[in-house]
Image: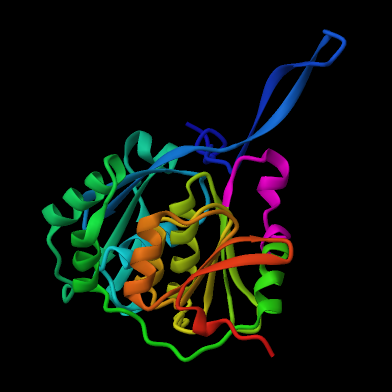
Amino acid sequence: MTDADREPRNLATATVNLWRWSADESAKPDTDSLAGEEPLEIRVRGESVAVTMRTPGNDAELAVGFLLSEGVIRSKSDILEIAPCQQGEAADRGNILNVFLSSSVEFDFEKLTRHVFASSSCGLCGKASIESVHQHFTPVESEIRLSPDTIRGLPDKLRARQDTFSQTGGLHAAALFDIEGTLLSAHEDIGRHNAVDKVLGTQFLAGACMSGAILMVSGRSSFEIMQKALSARIPIIAAISAPSSLAVEFAEESGQTLIGFLRGDSFNVYSHPERVTAG
């Protein structure tokens, strides 16, 4: 097998052939760019803990963001190495990532995998889920304040970083901003939760504190996204679309300000509105 044969085939976009129909009932051959989608298996100390469908790219950041939000890691020093599997087909496809942790990090493999597979298949719900999360991540306390003008400016700044979405129209995006609205990190992925993990992982690996940041997502806000934000101590979460009812309940009890329907000149504040101040 040559080096060219081993060139990773995982790409953020893929070109496909198609027939494009028009209003006059004619069809012409054409090509289109689609968002890439590949499975990523995350292993910790050689044992599989999760498989997620993602857009290839920034896989290490995704894995770190995932482990942060699951309460496995707390500091950058917990991570010894992140490396792709180098055996067999996995080496060619680049779809298995090993995370090696310090011996001081202890966690229950069985409990983690049970939680991951349960949340991905049937979702989490109810008061018990919120209380369970708070056992790992206590509610945030933050005195930061944000102006309406800064909030209104976030969608355009996020949209300007959605290069792959511009090509494919098929990706979610997430970004972190500081309190002045300056972009800190942005990532795209076919999964909204993966995009959030990539952003959190990027900042975590950089050793950046996120307790004064704003998380912006391109779609809706869900329980899982609020949980991930809480794991990074993020006090303000904004979304282009609607929140779920449990996301609002979670935000209220977690001390988080949740903003939804952030479009044009208007937005809704669903919890802790004291952090949004005019003038």
- Quadrant that contains the C terminus: bottom right
From this view, report whether residue 3 is shown above or below residue 207.
above
Left or right: 202 as drawn, with respect to 156:
left
Q: Nearer the viewer, residue 90 or 207?
A: 207
Question: Where is residue 10 shown, x and y percent of the image?
Answer: 52, 40
Picture coordinates of residue 153, whole percent (x, y): 71, 71
Start-end of magenta stretch: 158-172
Report which quarter residue 128 is drawn in: bottom left
Q: Quadrant of residue 32?
A: top right
The residue sitting at the top extreme is 25
Judged left or right of residue 227, residue 22 is right
Whether residue 63 can be seen here: no
Does 78 sit above or below residue 33? below
Q: Is residue 131 above or below residue 84?
A: below
> Coloured how?
rainbow
Observer-nearest of 9 and 134: 134
Q: Position of residue 1 (x, y in %)?
A: 47, 31
Residue 252, given in percent of the width and then of the height, sits at 37, 72
Q: Which residue shows up at 31% across the image and 63% down it?
A: 67
Asked whether residue 82 appears in the rendered view, the answer is yes
Looking at the image, residue 126 lies above or below residue 90: below
Q: How many marks?
A: 0
Q: Is residue 225 left or right of residue 116?
A: right
Q: Is residue 257 magenta?
A: no
Quarter of the image for residue 11 reads: top right
- In percent of the image, x 53 and y 37: which residue is there? 9
Residue at 66%, 62% in the rendered image? 158
